[in-house]
Amino acid sequence: MDKFMVIGERIHCISPTIRKALEERNPEPILKRAKEQIEAGATYLDVNIGPAEKDGEEVMTWAVKLIQDEFDNFPLALDTANRKAIEAGLKVYNDENGKAIINSADAGGRMDMFKLAAENNAKIIALCSKDGIPKDNDERMAYATEMLEKAMEFGMDPEDILFDPLFLVVKGMQDKQTEVLEAIKQLTDMGLKTTGGLSNISNGAPNDIRPIMDSAYAAMAMQCGLSSAIINPCEKRLMETIKTCDVIKNNILYADSYLEL
Amino acid sequence: MAFKMSVQKAKGKVEEVQLGSGDNAITIGGEATLPFYDFDGETGSKAKLGMEILDIYPEDWVKPLKETYKDVAEDPAKWAKFVEEEFNPDFICLRLEGADPNGLDKSPEECAEVCKSVAEAINTPLVIAGTNNHEKDKEVFEKVAQAVDGYNCLFLSATEENYKGVGAAASMAYSHKVGAESSVDINLAKQLNVLLGQLGVDYGDIVMNVGNAAAGYGFEYLVSTIDRIRLALFNQNDKTLTMPIITPVSFETWTVKESMAPEEEVPEWGSREQRGISMEVSTATSILSVGSDAVVLRHPKSLETLKELVDALE
């Protein structure tokens, strides 16, 4: 199996620093977070510019060029609900070190994003939902199959689709956790790739507990086959867990210094 | 429907490492597929074949070899020149047996003189092998690296015990190449590369010596180690395992009983020289076919045989 793919989540407009930097086109805070995440072992960086209804195309173009110019065309996930902004980002994206990831499509209104991915030789995150959270795994798998068929119609390679089963918060939805893990297993058994916003599961928990919950969940999900996640790579415990799981799963060769790599 | 050959695509590629300088410099590595799998991908540079010489008279070598080298074996520079002219190997491996603390215990300065004279005498790239005494090797290599500055030699080897000294002297202070030696321990092979990298040695200046064994002497384990190292690179693109591999075959094959037993003791085994060549050839052939990029040989007949094999498979 391939090594776990870490998509760094820290360039996100929900952070006031990043939102301000995006608004003012101030490179410094964005490059700082990009650098930290790359050094911490991110394989991809997510660039979330929010809904960006006003100037999304301009913002995404600026952000993609900024990060790729500074970090040797580092691979990125373009994250916004604004389709035009994603198109604009793809136009300037350089894929010599990895295809762009479109974040995201779903089985509802964003089904046409698969076409965009196919046309631009990009990867795509496919949310297993139509409107809101799927009620059970039957629904999840039905959406996944629907999206897979559509994407393949457009000529996509299934390898380039990262299925997101939608991670649910433990506090309040404790009874649903095993089912999500089961969905990862089912998707993996179909030979499909998976991803998701892992830290969702610890939402609302105290900050000192969250990394523990995220790490345990990552380990369990990786055993079910989870092949990537959108996480904070600067979270040491979580990264250590992921690397160790990669070693145990024989995705990377052990050496005494494996945690430093 | 037309037949479509399915191809195993590799995710990683072995670095190309240059040894020597000028017109006779050689490149080892560069492959992006298992050895001789030219139907799957780039096979890189042809396997390189080196010949072993010593810094002292080869007392323990078989008689016919001592006869071959009788006029030159007292002087390593003449010996090297002779080997270059007579046998034309891809590289010459000078083994500093005289530095062994349990033997003549020659000083690092003396070794440096010898290495310099050899490097100056030949155009063929030079590989310099130590004594296997980690402490002594470090001291020796520090002096030798300076003395052969500019010749782009490969030093065998840095180990877990002395990698700091050897790595710093050979590849950082002077621009040589460092051999990273792990004794048939796949995890250590990776670890040593990481440690050398953290020290500041460029990954492109490292050649791995991941272990050595004569066929029949734990050889399958060595084979599986090399196999797994290559697969970690080709399947997982492990950036810490991109170095080419050198195997000093002759260091092992001439020390096993098949090559050592005197003819008077086992007359039914036939000529000792022939047995030595057979051990060397069968071991080298096997190790090349599993992914070693270079081998060191002792007997001219072995070199000739391996040359023929490598050329025929090209």
Image (cartoon, coloured by chain):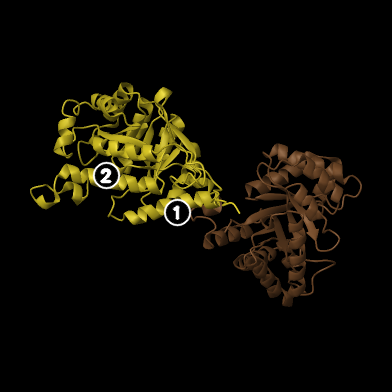
Chain colours: A brown, B yellow
* Chain holding disc 1: B
Q: In which quarter of the image is the C terminus of chain B?
A: top left
Q: Where is residue A83 in the image (x, y as percent from the top left)?
A: 85, 51
Q: What element carries label 2?
A: helix
Residue B280 image label: 2
Number of other residues with Cα within 10 Å of mark 1, as a class: few under 14, some 14 to 19, many 20 or more? some
Residue placed farthest to the front in the image?
B1
Q: Nearer the viewer, residue A106 or B2?
A: B2
Number of other residues with Cα within 10 Å of mark 2, as a class: few under 14, some 14 to 19, many 20 or more? many
Asked if residue A231 shows in the view, the reply is no
Q: Position of residue B272 (x, y in %)?
A: 15, 44
Q: What residue type is labelled 1?
A: Arg
Q: Which amino acid does label 2 sit on?
A: Glu
Quadrant of the image occupied by residue B164: top left
Q: How many labels does the image show?
A: 2
Q: Quadrant of the N terminus of chain B?
A: bottom right
Does residue A219 appear left or right of residue A58 in this picture? left
Q: Are marks 2 and 1 on the same chain?
A: yes
Q: Is mark 1 on a helix, strand or loop?
A: helix
Q: In this view, does B202 lie above or below A121?
A: above
Residue placed farthest to the left in the image?
B264
Residue on which disc 1 sits: B228
Q: In this view, does A53 lie above or below A249?
A: above
Asked if residue A254 shows in the view, the reply is yes
* Chain holding disc 2: B
Q: Which of marks 2 and 1 is nearer the N terminus?
A: 1
Q: Where is residue B115 in the image (x, y as percent from the top left)?
A: 30, 28
Q: Nearer the viewer, residue A226 or B293?
A: B293
Q: Is residue B220 above or below residue B50?
A: below
